[in-house]
């Protein structure tokens, strides 16, 4: 019969797990007053307080308020908005939207603002366009190659190749017409082809990572065998093996996801 562990107090990791949330959700929930600060020495939560939070469904409230996907910074937020609205959004545009009160800064990470995906997805495209237009002025209807790649969600090299293949015209500033870039975005066959190309590139990169980590594990096993055979005076560091196995588990989980998408 499994032994039930009864805790008298909880550290941050245990408290979050007890409520069914993650560490980032715990931190943000504390910042917004949904969850209490530790009541034991400012570092740990008593069992009584943990039970009270669980009994009141605080974990479910946290998930409902902030979702299950971690918030992202201004650079990634700009990329998400660019793909959504079809404009070359930059991180400064995201910050202007936040300054105008149209986008909520949910928290900070290393001193930088972060945003929830659901808040980004709720933004009015007209508001985003207005901010981008104010920044770009007379350049609003054109984009450079980097901006075009961002709008399309493509690697820069992919855009450069396809622009060359399609002989996409540039103006005297070396910029592309926004309408031409948006026409590429509307080409479903092209977008599917590039998505498959990106998937294959990501798969190749992940498989290379798997091989590198496997080599680390095999090297550890060889050093361990040397120690067992008394050919080495010290055993290998188990922390190295633990890190490698965690990485390998994550990599193989990602590979399994790739395989399910193609099944």
Image (cartoon, grey):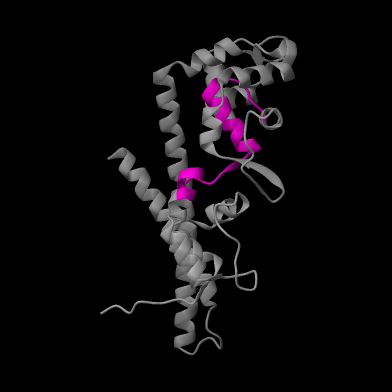
Above or below — where is 50 with respect to 261?
below
Of the 4 image quadrants, the one containing the C terminus is top left
Query: Is residue 153 among the parts visible in the rendering?
Result: no
Query: Is residue 39 among the parts visible in the rendering?
Result: yes
Of the 4 image quadrants, the one containing the N terminus is bottom left
Dominant secondary structure of the residues highlighted in magenta in the image: helix
Magenta highlight range: 61-90
In percent of width and height, residue 104 lies at 62, 36
Above or below — where is 135 with respect to 109?
above
Above or below — where is 211 with respect to 174?
below
Q: Residue at x 55, y 21 (%)?
A: 85
In percent of width and height, residue 106 lies at 61, 42
Viewer-proximal residue, 139 or 199?
A: 139
Q: Residue at x 59, y 52 (%)?
A: 33
Viewer-proximal residue, 257 or 21?
A: 21
Q: Is residue 168 left or right of residue 136?
A: left
Dividing the picture into quadrants, the one containing residue 73 is top right
Q: Is residue 77 magenta?
A: yes
């Amino acid at each position: 019969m499994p032994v039930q562990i009864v805790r008298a107090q909880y550290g941050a990791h245990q408290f979050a797990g007890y409520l069914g949330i993650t560490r980032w959700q715990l931190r943000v929930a504390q910042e917004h007053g949904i969850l209490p600060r530790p009541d034991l020495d400012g570092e740990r939560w008593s069992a009584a307080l943990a039970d009270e939070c669980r009994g009141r469904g605080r974990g479910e409230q946290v998930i409902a308020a902030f979702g299950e996907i971690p918030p992202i910074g201004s650079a990634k937020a700009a990329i998400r908005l660019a793909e959504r609205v079809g404009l070359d959004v930059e991180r400064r545009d995201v910050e202007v939207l936040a300054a105008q009160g149209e986008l909520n800064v949910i928290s900070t990470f290393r001193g930088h603002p972060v945003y929830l995906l659901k808040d980004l997805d709720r933004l009015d495209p007209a508001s985003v366009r207005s901010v981008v237009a104010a920044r770009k002025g007379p350049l609003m209807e054109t984009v450079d190659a980097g901006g075009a790649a961002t709008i399309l969600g493509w690697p820069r090299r992919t855009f450069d190749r396809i622009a060359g293949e399609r002989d996409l015209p540039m103006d005297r500033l070396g910029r592309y017409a926004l309408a031409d870039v948006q026409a590429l975005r509307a080409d479903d066959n092209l977008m599917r082809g590039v998505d498959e190309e990106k998937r294959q590139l990501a798969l190749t990169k992940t498989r290379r990572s798997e091989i590198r980590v496997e080599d680390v594990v095999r090297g550890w096993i060889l050093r361990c065998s040397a120690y067992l055979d008394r050919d080495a005076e010290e055993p290998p560091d188990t922390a190295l093996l633990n890190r490698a196995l965690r990485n390998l588990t994550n990599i193989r989980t990602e590979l399994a996801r790739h395989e399910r998408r193609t099944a």
